[in-house]
Image (tube, rainbow, N blue to C red):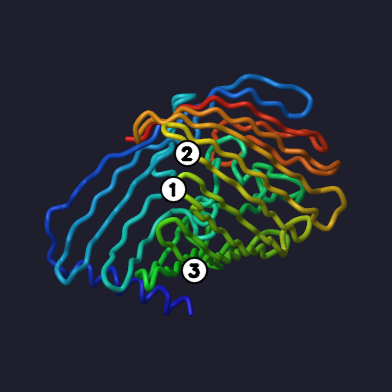
Amino acid sequence: MKTIKFGLVAAAVLASLAVPAMAADVTIYGRAHLSLDSLDNGDEDGTNVSSNSSRLGFKASTKLEGGLEAFVQIEQNIRFDEGSGNWASRDSFVGIKGDFGQVRAGQFDTPLKAVRSKVDMFGDRIGDIRNLTRTSTSGTGNADIGNVFDERYKNGVHYRSPSMNNFTFDLHYTPHNNTGATVDNVQESYSMSVSYEVKGFYAAVAYETFEGQNDLDPSAVRVGVFYDITDAFRLAGMYQNASDVPGGDRNVYGIGASYKMGAYTLRSQYYVAGDNDADDTGANMFVVGADRNFGKDLVMYVAYGVTSNDDNANFRVSAGGRDTQLSTIRGENASGLSLGLQYSF
């Protein structure tokens, strides 16, 4: 089965090399997203500056004969707060697309992660849904190590179908999510989704599974949806069931809303992480905020969020897309007040 998969990808790449090409179109883009945060771990608090999924990227594409197009992207994380970054650390890939859809290879978000990105009212901010959807080795929070959903897998191969009656299918295969070569394909993973999107409405269901540690093969089913009740008012929600993860199965679910008033946008969301196999290991997270848009490229915002942990849980409020995070004391509430500025170019 693996030989067949490799053969199909190799055939697509070789076919693209045999087609004459036009000159490439190159684009430089990026985002500077910083925030001034007051973070509380349940016992102490402090003031921090955080660079939140800030990036610099390069895109290029070339039209080919036969209706094909070759494309490439190189994107890296930029730490504006500490003056550092890692080359090609974010979505970086090369691929080819045409009437058949598109195929690409490299490191990039999985279809499961993409569903959350579409419905998260506070992506890369205080109160990001990833505060609850990630799972650690202890199964009682989102530690920096362990089995984690919402990943950007290494060594990925991804196929996206053309849109058919507004439906799109995505399949992402990773032979091993690690560096270097392998002979046993440990950490092999699959992620797939079916999505439906028209103006003002989006719905998707995704499934992901990978080879974990300690004889566990974590998997997750995720459903996400948003609906624009009016041009100004959007409702969104997401449900996730994670199984065969450390600590036992866990459900995460919640809703969010946003309302536009001229240059301002009010937003909030509430999410719940249920207990796993142990008692009192759940949490709920509430966050509220307001944006001020200065044109389409510059946004200033304020947000306040609280994650209320059960006695045996330590979920955060400052994780998910943020480079400065504060671990939470088990059984205590985490909170954060954030003033942010986001400039896209």
Quadrant in the rendering for residue 189: bottom right
Q: How far apart are marks 2 and 3 (CA)?
A: 29 Å
Residue at numbered disc 2 = 260
Q: Which corner quadrant holds the C terminus?
A: top left
Whichever of labels 1 and 3 marks the residue nearer the N terminus, that label is: 3
Whichever of labels 2 and 3 marks the residue nearer the N terminus, that label is: 3
Q: Which residue lies furthest to the front in this view?
A: 230
At label 3, counting other C-alpha atoms closer than 10 Å, the crowd grade (few under 14, some 14-19, many 20 or more) is some
Q: Nearer the viewer, residue 338 or 210?
A: 338
Name the front one of labels 2 and 3: 2
Q: Residue 136 carries which label?
A: none
- Residue at screen point 49% across, 30% down: 51
Q: Where is residue 182 drawn, in percent x and y?
A: 51, 63
- Residue at screen point 12% across, 53% down: 23
Q: What residue type is labelled 2?
A: Lys
Q: Which mark is residue 231?
A: 1
Q: Are marks 2 and 1 in contact (CB under 8 Å)?
A: yes
Q: What element carries label 2?
A: strand
Q: Distance between the residues labelled 2 and 1?
A: 8 Å
Q: Where is residue 92 drawn, in percent x and y?
A: 38, 50
- Residue at screen point 63% across, 23% down: 38
Name the front one of labels 1 and 3: 1
Q: What residue type is labelled 1?
A: Asp
As displayed, is residue 334 above or below residue 89?
Answer: above
Whichever of labels 2 and 1 marks the residue nearer the N terminus, that label is: 1
Q: Residue 194 carries which label?
A: 3
Q: Is mark 1 on a helix, strand or loop?
A: loop
At label 1, counting other C-alpha atoms closer than 10 Å, the crowd grade (few under 14, some 14-19, many 20 or more) is few
Q: Which amino acid does label 3 sit on?
A: Val
As displayed, is residue 12 above or below residue 113?
Answer: below
